[in-house]
Image (cartoon, rainbow, N blue to C red):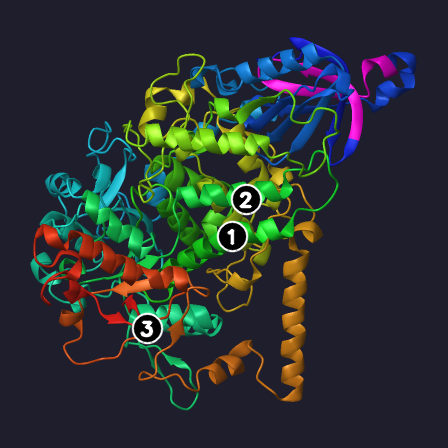
Amino acid sequence: MAAPHTPKHCYSDIKALRGGNPELGDLGLNDFHLVFRFPPESQTAADPSLKKQVKQVWFAFHVISQCALKTPPPASGVPSSIRIRFRDFTYVCFHFDDDKEARDAFDFIRARTCRLGSIENLLAFSYRPPHNSPEHKVNGWDLYDAKAEFRRQGISEKCADLGWRVSSINRDYAFSPTYPSVLVVPSKISDNTLKYASNFRSRARIPTLTYLHPVNNCTITRSSQPFVGLRMKRSIQDERLVGACFSASADLMDTATATNAETTSPDSSHVDLSADSADADLTMSETERMEDELIAGTNAFYDEKTGKRLIYGAQQHNLIVDARPAINSYAMQAIGMGSENMDYYRFARKVFLNIDNIHVMRESLEKVISAIKDADVSPFPPVRDLLVKSKWLKHITGILDGSAIIARQVAIQHSHVLIHCSDGWDRTSQLSALAQLMLDPYYRTLEGFMVLVEKDWLSFGHMFQLRSAYLSHESWFTVDSDALAGSAVKPGENDGRSDAIENVLTSAKRFWNKNVSSDKDTSSDLDDASAVDEAKPAAVPVAEGQATKLKDVSPVFHQFLDATYQLLRQHPTRFEFNERFLRRLLYHTYSCQYGTFLLNNERQRHEAKLSERTRSVWAYFLSRRPEFTNTQYDPTIDDHIKGRERLIFPRLGETRWWHQVFNRTDDEMNSAINASAATAERVAAYQASSGLSEPHTGSDSESASRESMSPIHSPQLTQSQSVLTGVEYAHAALTPETRSPPSLNRSSSASEVPNAFAALQDKISGLSITKGVFGGGPDTGANAGRNRVGGAYV
């Protein structure tokens, strides 16, 4: 490692506080790390026997997310302190007897964290593993080859034609700068058609393949939102491309007729999986079953005697999945974007998922941090009320639910799925990667998971640099000269003055900066149009496009790893890697020790020659395989043996806090949830033994729950149960007779969508832009594709 082991600054006899436990030691600062050595040299010199007990703890500067210097007046008798929160949720407080030393240390840490000016001053460009180490012998950059991965899926020039081809249209990244150089598209669609279609998708992120199912040839494709706008624009080329994606693996009819009826999207299943589908259906929760029926409309049938769902071969309901809340999607039409008009995509149905944008997710994590923020000075557990108010587990559960919907459609319903959000690199990456993790055992191996991250996160342009803020931010470093004067640091203490001043300053900044700037690399989630960048001018010039923008920072990849942890926890034998692998991967997402996650897309990494100038994080993991291997892993795949099936699905009711990543115990984070679950189980057991009701598990309970369910009486979903908020399809074309499709009863947040939508419609109705705007026209307009039932568009 190029970072020197000899510190540039040394401070003796510093008291460190972590978890309320003090430790005396020596603090050293070098270019990239803070190193705490204990016991201090003053003690080991007096007692040489202590040298055998000396330990060192290294903290990377780039992992710092908050650093506060407190310097009370000398007369107070309170030592100066530096309190640091790291992004791996480590908390530590250093106390200095010398005020000047504390200020010098704080200034050095700040200079080496948020005043670097360029990513080329990060640790990744200096780090080299020792020549005799196993890591030095592994080149992690060789792990991922896009063509090799698609060849594994069965797509290459030398393989049998499965309806897909590798296009070189983006080989120089000129077609779509944020997309990978290797794009897989339907064989029947020419590059010329792709060029026209790109004009209809944000940032030219056209629908392109990411996964082909090995059994039924059904697919997951991904894209960005279309440019629909208020005039409900369309693109014939985009419609042809999406239609081809949904039928590429079968002998196709003419594309023009393929857009006239749903039946023209032929069944691409080459293998009858109906038996497997039935077995999988029996293990579904009631919410999952209702989601599938809502998507299927009235095409789902049940045996009148047994209540068991009847499955006739592969029942396709090809889906366009818009990951955004419906109201956000509608609002985007006002700025020329939006979601597909299903009148022109009659070969598919569209579902909306209630997954919130990056700003909501950032605020959610900030509330979690508030619940555990005193972990340096206090041994007490987190504030449980704040954990609940954060809604973090609700967000994780929603992401898992949406991914499971996609996986079920592909594997069980034999359907094709196109996923997008706004620009298609945040929520789209979450849903796409997690669905593939559920579908394909390969991605549950150590190398397979790395390939999945490379493919669906790095190559498809998740903006790691913007989301992770590798160059930090000045506002993360604060100096407080008197707030705690004359008092000791106590958990949760706040005199209120700083909050009042901060609120005034924040309001002023928002007022003056409201419409000041628009940056080229704007956030993908434009849903929150009121978000403003409150970044202060950097102390040193920052390379173009590399400055941290607070409104772009969000724990999107963290959520993906958290959701993966939930699957690993619920299916401990189905993953080759262990929990520590996920935790270390999250750490190295921020450590900047490796070049893997630097910059925002494949093109930028290629131009910066990161593969030549930095090391890959995969070398770190592969060279330490035993440390990250799950000892319970069973690689056997047998769909006839429970626990060894190819498919895995989340049990949404068992979502728990990833307590290890927050450096807490399971009891501290999950005791209340576990106690509630145990109580519910005891109540259910008592009711079952007393004959009061059937237990809600097993096939008997599923049959009982369906006693009132029939093609006439449709299920009801509430938003508290499901992330699915609505279904759209070309109703007039698909259902010429009168039908009563399933309805969706929303919670208050979801039920506001039609009302808010109507209000938005009223606001623009006077513009007389065109008939059919926001569904206000005749039945042949936008509203023809929506069947409004129960307060929702279905």
- Name the chief secondary structure element in magenta: strand
Looking at the rendered structure, the kind of residue marked 3 is: Ser
Residue 448 visible in the snapshot: no
Please state if 534 lies on the left or on the right of 232 as rendered.
right
For residue 79, above or below residue 432: above
Q: Amino acid at mark 2?
A: Lys
Instruction: Reply above or below: 633 against 423.
Output: below
* In the image, farthest residue toward the bottom: 305
The residue at 71%/11% (across/down) is 10
Mark 2 vs mark 3, CA separation in Å: 34 Å
Secondary element at tag 3:
strand
Q: Is residue 459 magenta?
A: no
Seen in the picture, residue 83 relative to 687 is either above or below; the reply is: above
Of 696 and 167, the residue lying toward us: 696
Residue 33 is one of the magenta-drawn residues:
yes
Cβ–Cβ under 8 Å for marks 2 and 1: yes
Label of residue 391 in the image: 1
Residue nearest the viewer, comparing 375 with 501: 501
Q: Earlier in the sequence, mark 2 or mark 3?
A: 2
| Labels 2, 3: front one | 2
Question: Residue 709: x percent and y percent?
Answer: 39, 83
